[in-house]
Image: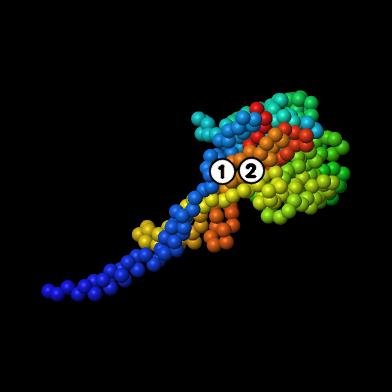
Amino acid sequence: MKIDIKKIFLFSIILIAIVILPDINMYRERYKLRSQKLPEIYKNQTELEHLKDDDYEVIKIKKNAAEPIIQANDSTIVIFTKNSKDSEKGSSDYENIWYKINLKGQITDSLKYSYNSLDNEHDYHTFNNYIIDTKQNTYSNWIKNNDTRHYAFKNMNENKIFTKEEADKITSEGKIMQIDYSYLGDNGIDSKNKVIIFKNGVWNYFYTEKNWHESANYTTNEFQAQFYYPIDKELVTAPTAGNEKKSKQIFFDINNPKSIIYREYVFKEKWNENSFWYNIMNWHWGSGNTSSSGGWTGSSYFSIKMPKKTLHYKQAVYIDSPDESLRDHISYSVYKPKNGEYILLDSYLIRPK
């Protein structure tokens, strides 16, 4: 039997093309990555939580971003952090901690409230210079004067559901902090509104009809600290919201070397597109579209301007394809105290040792 070398060769070429061509873009991108090298100046940089320095230390102090930072006075801020974990009872254990921090970044005082979800129902907030529990209808003056006692809201009338006209009159003379639905029965339909309002220096609550809504008199948190937020424009003050006399947000260009945080360099490390044949072999009914448009994972390299020196760290980043827009894994909201020696970067406190 005579072997046709030309046909075998042609068949091999066609087979290789069938195997390779669907993934040609993946191979090209991976080849390009192998030819790139990270500059030497960035090779020893670590993630923010592992940053080591002779003059500064990094502490992860805030595990959630739900509550604002409170500017208690010119030299002190208050941070509120919430933690929870499953308990042996099959419920949840909650821990609420407030920290007072001075201009050096030192914790000067703290307050902790702990409870189990089966034993009590609480919902804590920091509002102006008060700690509010909207479930138990209490407030604390600890932020102002270190008094840890709980004081009751004034109840305008526990047994009355105020009409729309009555509620409008009450709220026109005060500032609404929160409106919650309060269910009257087990059917989940009958309800009333519970309105918490700060009026004439007193915390009050009352009940209104379930269809009553009001937004004009919602109060802003006057003690909320001013933060810097990254955008792709030059430094600009954000528009004020509501009746605020001064915006609580300032935007900065994270790609500008003059900014407090500057993205110096982005390095692509991995192309994330799956092989066409991998997707085919792992496809099954109900799995949806297994194709991917690619993109890279890598690291962004940042510098932070501190009072004594500039610090450097890296952070994981996702780079979209084809526009190469960046998606960072954490936000870069920054609090920088006037005449202070520390900064708050997202959940991290960076302070002198």
Q: Position of residue 283 (x, y in %)?
A: 38, 60
Name which residue type carries label 2: Ser
Secondary structure of the residue carrying numbered label 1: helix
The one nearer the camera, 195 or 34, is 34
Name which residue type carries label 1: Ile
Residue 293 in sight: yes
Q: Nearer the viewer, mark 2 or mark 1?
A: 1
Residue at 78%, 37% in the rendered image:
338
Residue position for label 2: 303
Q: Position of residue 172 (x, y in %)?
A: 86, 47
Counting residues from the start of the chain, the first of labels 2 and 1 encountered is 1
Secondary structure of the residue carrying numbered label 2: strand
- Asked if residue 250 is positioned above or below residue 98 in the image, the reply reads below
The one nearer the camera, 98 or 202, is 98
Residue 230 in sight: no
Bin the neighbour count of mark 2 within 10 Å (Cα to Cα): few under 14, some 14-19, many 20 and up: some
Residue position for label 1: 41
Residue at 75%, 33% in the rendered image:
340
The coloring applied to the image is: rainbow
- Asked if residue 197 is positioned above or below residue 34 in the image, the reply reads above
Does residue 24 appear left or right of residue 46 in this picture?
A: left
Q: Position of residue 117 (x, y in %)?
A: 59, 33
Name which quarter of the figure residue 21 lies in.
Answer: bottom left
- Asked if residue 26 is positioned above or below residue 154 in the image, the reply reads below
Residue at 83%, 48% in the rendered image:
243
Name which quarter of the figure residue 50 lies in.
Answer: top right
Q: Are marks 2 and 1 in contact (CB under 8 Å)?
A: no
